[in-house]
Image: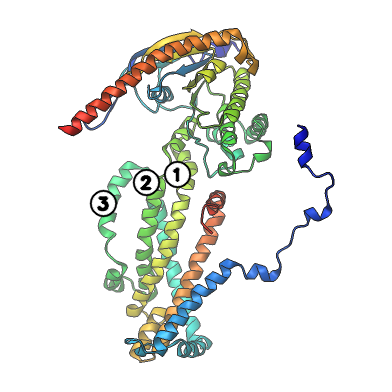
Amino acid sequence: MKNQTNTIPEKINESDFVFERPSFLSKIFTLKMVLNTASVLSLFVIWGLLVNFGIYRFVLIPGPAEVLEWGIEWMGSKGFWMDASLSTLRVLGGFTFACLIAIPTGLMIGWNKIFSDLTFPTLEILRPIPGIAYIPIAILFFPWEEASVAFICFVGAFFPILLNTITGVRLIDRDYFRAAQCLGSRPRHIFWHIVVPGALPSISTGAALGMGIAWMASVAGEMISGKWGLGYRIWEAYTLIRYPLIVDGMIVIGLLGLGSSTLIRFITLRLIPWRKAITESLDESITK
Amino acid sequence: MVDSNHKGEVVFENVTRAVQTKKTETIILDHCSFVIESGKLTVLIGPSGCGKTTIINLIAGYEKPDRGKVLIDGKPVAGPDRERLVVFQETALFPWLTCYDNVMFGPLATKVMTREEAHEQTVNLLEKVGLRDFLYKYPMQLSGGMMRRAELARALINRPTVMLMDEPFRGLDAMTRELMQEYYLRLVEESHGTHLFVTSEIEEAIFLADRLIIMTNKPSRVKHTLDIDLPRPRIASVLRSKRYIELKSLTLEILHEEAVKASRASGKADIAIESGLRT
């Protein structure tokens, strides 16, 4: 006991308790931010070098400066906002419908054996058919162009969301169901309080994936059946030999895709507060 | 009180339970018969892999006996029910609910009490197990010992007739384990329900039990039952009493015999596998 008291300093100085507040600059210039910026910049640098030195057939590809010039002009025009907003609406529309149908269906398939046997084989046949293959049928079927493009997005987003929902339910620990049963939970209660929250993390993964694929599908859909939209603009720029605009369209799609998946991550983090506790503990084990 | 003395009696009548894999059939319980007296804390102990968890699953209603009967107060078990509550080996706290919501789960699912009553009892119980400051933490943010205590609270708030503990303190360090045993005993001595506690630790078994059921190696039967006549409330000093040491050495002797048999049986299996590989 006496040994212990010896290790404690007799006098405690106030200066021992001064914590350095991180300055504004040190907040921005974290290692993470520097690395992230370097990652994006290097993409442009490599592209610029390849075009500049005309390596292989890169002479045919527009360079960053040209693309920037065209891009600024395009973004100043009304047409750009029309294209961007219409594409976004189509993607969001298709994505929302996909969520509304895929999530409940997936929950039922994962939870109910009979429902699973009834629907799953059919869905497995439909699954390998790519969204693009639906384009002619969509044009024939839908009286409205917007609907047919949104439908292509819907098809793209539907299966990743569905499959992740199913896996989400099936991966719920059996003990949770057993525990709920002996705590007096009836099937309907189990569905809402075990199946739904238990599958949520996986559903959010599916949603993020689905959103990405919906953007991919939108470009294909617009190239063929639209008058407006980023995908249509890219195709038009090709046929009119306005090549830099092609790359501008691609960049805008990339940024919008990034924006929408960030939005999804933000929403799901709100829906899954317990996930934060998990990821925080995981962060510690990632090598820095 | 009178009521509790007559409810929650569990009877195993010639229960046989086998697990079938593709080719072989392993008999886990073989014509196993015993009685778990109501209002008492019975501890089931036996060599590992002797089907202790199977017994819990049979009483809880997660599994059905292949032959024989499992009776609760004279009626055969029909399926999982809130009268028979299980505390699992691994923690089964719902990770998506806070500590508080986990404990509230039972009362809100069954609606046997109002939300206000449930709230009051939840806070009360969590305070008793030392989790007053952790009400709104998620299970992931708790330590192993805290999770087990939260789980005890989640089970006890429902006042089950039979409470089934499946090696609940396994994997905890020795200090936490001791603490948990004391928390558990305090709660049990207040609750007066029937408790079945499964463990493979002899000290734990004798420290907790009113009655000790010692199982044989697989296929399991009851090898021996012992009444543990140590005084209640049990405190740590019991562990140094002469009677405790007597009971411990007696149990050890009985279990040792079984352990020897078990290792011989697995030795045979090893030889069988080897010769199978050679041919």
Is residue A227 something that shows in the picture? no
Looking at the picture, which amino acid does disc 1 mark?
Val
Q: Is residue B212 found left or right of B217 in the rendered image?
A: right
Q: Which residue is mark 3?
A: A121
Residue in view at x 41 percent, y 52 percent: A104
Q: Callout 2 environment at 10 Å: few (<14), some (14 to 19), or many (20+)?
A: many
Whole-number angstrom distance, CA of label 2 to CA of label 1: 9 Å
Nearest to N terminus: mark 2 or mark 3: 2
Identify the disc placed on residue A110.
Answer: 2
Residue in view at x 44 percent, y 57 percent: A205
Q: Which residue is mark 1?
A: A195
Please, which chain is the residue tagged with disc 3 on?
A
Q: Callout 1 environment at 10 Å: few (<14), some (14 to 19), or many (20+)?
A: many
Mark 2–mark 1 contact, CB under 8 Å?
yes
Nearest to N terminus: mark 1 or mark 3: 3
Q: Callout 3 environment at 10 Å: few (<14), some (14 to 19), or many (20+)?
A: few
Q: In the rendered image, which quarter is residue A225 located in? A: bottom left
Whole-number angstrom distance, CA of label 1 to CA of label 3: 22 Å
In the image, residue A17 above or below residue A5: below
Q: Are marks 1 and 3 on the same chain?
A: yes
Q: Secondary structure at mark 3?
A: helix
Q: Is residue A159 found left or right of A197 in the rendered image?
A: left
Please, which chain is the residue tagged with disc 1 on?
A
Q: Are marks 2 and 1 on the same chain?
A: yes
Residue in view at x 38 percent, y 66 percent: A213
Whole-number angstrom distance, CA of label 2 to CA of label 3: 13 Å
